[in-house]
Image (spheres, rainbow, N blue to C red):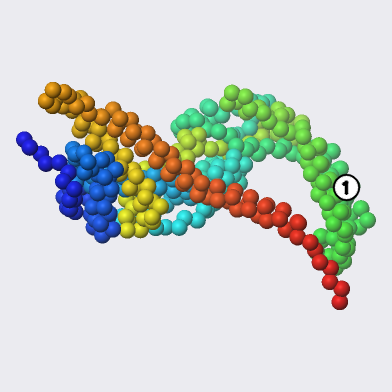
């Protein structure tokens, strides 16, 4: 089979490229022919034969354009993925020409989880439960309670509400009573003559006084009510002090001494809340809606890189072709082909071009540009420090 090789007269043929990604771009059609001539001359044509066809150069050109687009959009995805997560994906709508402004949605989602642990937000439901207290019983098994309630899986107790009747020390020596520092006996600042009452009189107190009242109330609750607390070990809730029976006239009236309330979450719901199953929103780099670039919109910087990468790919293809035969016999001698030189040169050129392109994208990333602008501002400030300041006397 006699397959013709490159004849120096490349003609655009849309069927000569395997994918046809850019066949409708007029600039691509024009540059396809020019790049084929460029690569052939760089490989030695017409001084030596080039064992390729025009379609070989066209295919390399299409691949080089696609690689450029992939590198560009991989950089954009890396730079903006936090802002793109959760973006609605619509058919035939791509981000190629979009300006992406950073947003705080990912930070807000993260802060929701912190709010969940603090009991001030989040997306995990807090449930309430109750356990009847029994006289002389100090320990209550929450695992047994969960089984009796038909709760499946593990739960996590978030808050326990336990406060027995206020002791005498708190009843008679707290800031709410007449004996306390906030009562009517304290300079008549409560009740009819108080600063917060509904009487006819009103006394405006300084802000420092209000702060002292607040601190006194908080310290009162911390010190005088501290005898009543709880602890949890291995699913067992222990309350202090041990509840006693209700008595009247020294006779036991009831061993049911009320209930203890608590809030809890279901651990499996907490785990499930971190995963949002979706196939219509951006969830990872693979489904960010970018498509192949519009070749007509690629500037001269990008096109020059594509030309050089096409040459490297053409070297690689030619090296594989010439590698079919190590030598070609001629009368009284053999010709050794340069397969190894072509392949090693192609590999080196491709690596250098990719490193150069990625370095260029890194230098133009948002963080790099902001750092450069900050450095420029600092340099300007230093330069302005040397400008003499004139004093005008009018």
Please state the total of marks drawn on the protein image. 1
Q: Foreground residue, 111 or 153?
A: 111
Residue 279 visible, this angle:
no
Quadrant of the rendering where the N terminus is positioned? top left
Q: Which residue is mark 1?
A: 180
* In the image: residue 359, left or right of residue 247: left
* In the image: residue 204, left or right of residue 57: right
- The structure residue drawn at horizontal position 29% and vertical position 39%, both measured from the top left corner, is 313
- The structure residue drawn at horizontal position 78% and vertical position 41%, both measured from the top left corner, is 221
Residue 386: x and y, percent? 76, 56
Residue 387 visible, this angle:
yes
| Residue 95 against residue 267 in the figure, above or below | below
Seen as rendered, the residue at the extreme left is 1
* In the image: residue 117, left or right of residue 338: right
| Residue 57 against residue 184 in the figure, above or below | above
Q: Secondary structure at mark 1?
A: loop
Residue 207 lies in what quarter of the image?
bottom right
Residue 374: x and y, percent? 63, 51
Seen as rendered, the residue at the extreme front is 332
| Residue 70 against residue 103 in the figure, above or below | above
Residue 316: x and y, percent? 27, 35
- The structure residue drawn at horizontal position 80% and vertical position 63%, both measured from the top left corner, is 389
Quadrant of the rendering where the C terminus is positioned? bottom right
Residue 46: x and y, percent? 21, 43
Q: Foreground residue, 197 or 343?
A: 343
* In the image: residue 120, left or right of residue 60: right
Give neighbour class at mark 1: few <14, some 14-19, many 20+ (Cα, 10 Å).
Answer: some
Seen as rendered, the residue at the extreme bottom is 394
Residue 50 lies in what quarter of the image?
top left
Q: Foreground residue, 88 or 145?
A: 88
- The structure residue drawn at horizontal position 44% and vertical position 48%, both measured from the top left corner, is 76
């Amino acid at each position: 089979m006699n397959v013709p090789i490159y004849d120096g007269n490349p003609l655009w043929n849309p069927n000569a490229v395997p994918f046809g990604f850019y066949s409708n771009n007029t600039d691509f059609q024009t540059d396809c022919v020019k790049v084929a001539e460029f690569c052939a001359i760089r490989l030695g044509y017409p001084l030596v034969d080039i064992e390729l066809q025009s379609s070989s150069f066209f295919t390399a050109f299409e691949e080089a354009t696609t690689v450029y687009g992939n590198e560009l959009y991989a950089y954009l995805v890396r730079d903006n993925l936090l802002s793109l997560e959760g973006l609605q994906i619509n058919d035939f709508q791509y981000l190629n020409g979009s300006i992406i402004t950073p947003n705080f949605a990912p930070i807000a989602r993260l802060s929701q989880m912190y709010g969940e642990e603090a009991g001030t937000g989040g997306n995990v439901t807090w449930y309430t439960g109750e356990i009847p207290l029994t006289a002389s019983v100090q320990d209550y098994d929450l695992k047994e309670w969960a089984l009796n309630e038909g709760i499946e899986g593990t739960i996590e107790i978030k808050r326990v509400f336990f406060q027995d009747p206020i002791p005498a020390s708190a009843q008679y020596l707290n800031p709410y009573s007449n004996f306390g520092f906030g009562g009517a006996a304290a300079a008549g600042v409560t009740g009819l003559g108080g600063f917060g009452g509904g009487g006819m009189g009103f006394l405006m107190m300084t802000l420092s006084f209000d702060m002292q009242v607040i601190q006194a109330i908080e310290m009162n609750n911390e010190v005088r009510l501290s005898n009543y607390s709880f602890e949890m070990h291995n699913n067992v809730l222990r309350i202090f002090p041990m509840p006693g029976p209700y008595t009247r006239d020294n006779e036991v009236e009831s061993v049911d001494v009320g209930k203890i309330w608590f809030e809890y979450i279901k651990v499996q719901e907490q785990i499930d809340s971190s995963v949002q199953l979706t196939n219509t929103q951006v969830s990872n780099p693979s489904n960010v809606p970018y498509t192949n670039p519009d070749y007509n919109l690629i500037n001269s910087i990008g096109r020059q890189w594509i030309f050089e990468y096409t040459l490297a790919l053409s070297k690689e293809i030619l090296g594989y072709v010439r590698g079919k035969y190590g030598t070609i016999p001629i009368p009284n001698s053999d010709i050794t082909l340069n397969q190894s030189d072509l392949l090693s040169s192609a590999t080196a050129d491709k690596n250098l071009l990719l490193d150069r392109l990625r370095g260029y994208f890194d230098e133009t990333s948002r963080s790099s540009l902001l750092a450069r602008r900050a450095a420029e501002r600092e340099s300007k400030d230093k330069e302005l420090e040397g400008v003499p300041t004139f004093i005008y006397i009018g």
